[in-house]
Amino acid sequence: MALYDVIVVGGGPAGMTAALYALRNGKTVLIIEKNGFGGQITHSPRVENYPGIPVMSGNEFADKLFDQIIAQGAEFEIETVTSVECDGDLRIVKTEEGTEHTGKTVILATGVKHRMLGLEGEEDLVGEGISFCAVCDGDFYAGKSVCVAGGGNSALQEAILLAEKCTQVTILQDLPQLTGEAKLQEVLAARDNVRVITNVQICGLRADEDGFKGVTVRERSTGSEQDVDCDGLFVAIGLIPENDPFKELADLNSWGYFDSDEQCLTKTPGIFVAGDCRSKFIRQLTTASADGAVAALAACRYINQN
């Protein structure tokens, strides 16, 4: 069985950047990804906020970064990691497929997934009318109308950003009232181009060959339905970290994120975390990449000192 200096769990921007920095420091690297390399950024058809690159698609970024780490000597597996065990100075990574991989260090870059509405055709419309990030995709809807699904702080913050660019922002909340902070609600209430519809559930997505057309909502009290026209839908109903299998190695906060600061360290020597799976205020492509670099260099220091 091969012994790797660094095993990276997760093939998003944080994980692949971690692999790159470890490789550039002369370490052997295995990167394990359960789905496809690139993570959430692959859902963005246009990325315009990455320094030095005026415009690219998320897929282009992921493909180039993957090619870069393979050219540097990274090995990869498409497998689902179920656990990491410590055996003295070694870290044993076990997978759902029944394989085991041994490393001196492990970087957990497991990412998060957006909580979805669970509607027919939703996956196909991601990046084609459905978005999750106003900072990333808001400019594409400048001068257009959008809906925001959700009523918590994240949804209201998204709506505030979108209200600066869009002609109409409609907040769709499935509870009888918004749950976000009062100050955020005050900011939105002062905007003429923002309306709020509460106690409705999005029950359908409307699109044709020309693109996204809007949503259908059902009033929760009466069951009546109505169509809400819009050019885009921003879903802001939460993120889901998938860190539970590793909670014995790295503390989790009350939301399930790795409770680690900017140093990307954990309570277990030789185990590091990086990216959106870590407790943080900002989750962007740049911050994920930054975490990957920090975690990789920390892993390299650990190897060199032990």
Image (tube, rainbow, N blue to C red):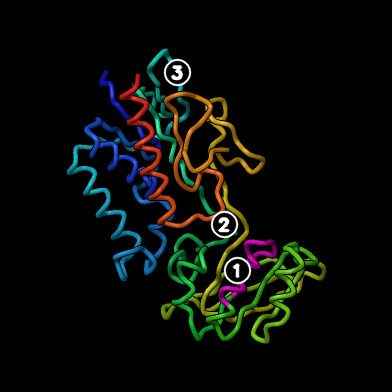
Q: Which residue is mark 3?
A: 86
> Closer to the camera, 5 or 256?
5
Residue occupying the point 35% across, 19% down: 306
Q: Earlier in the sequence, mark 3 or mark 1?
A: 3
C-alpha separation, residue under disc 2 versus residue under disc 1:
13 Å
Question: Which tag is nearer the camera, tag 2 or tag 3?
Answer: 3
Q: Which residue is mark 1?
A: 204
Q: For residue 116, which numbered disc appears in the image?
A: 2
Mark 2 neighbour density, 10 Å: few (under 14) some (14–19) many (20 or more): some
Span highlighted in magenta in the image: 147-162
Q: Is residue 259 left or right of residue 211?
A: right
Q: Earlier in the sequence, mark 2 or mark 1?
A: 2
The amino acid beneath tag 1 is Gly
Residue occupying the point 72% across, 63% down: 180
Question: Which tag is nearer the camera, tag 2 or tag 1?
Answer: 2
Q: Which image quarter: residue 198?
A: bottom right
Which SS does the magenta portion mostly show?
A: helix
Residue occupying the point 56% across, 75% down: 162
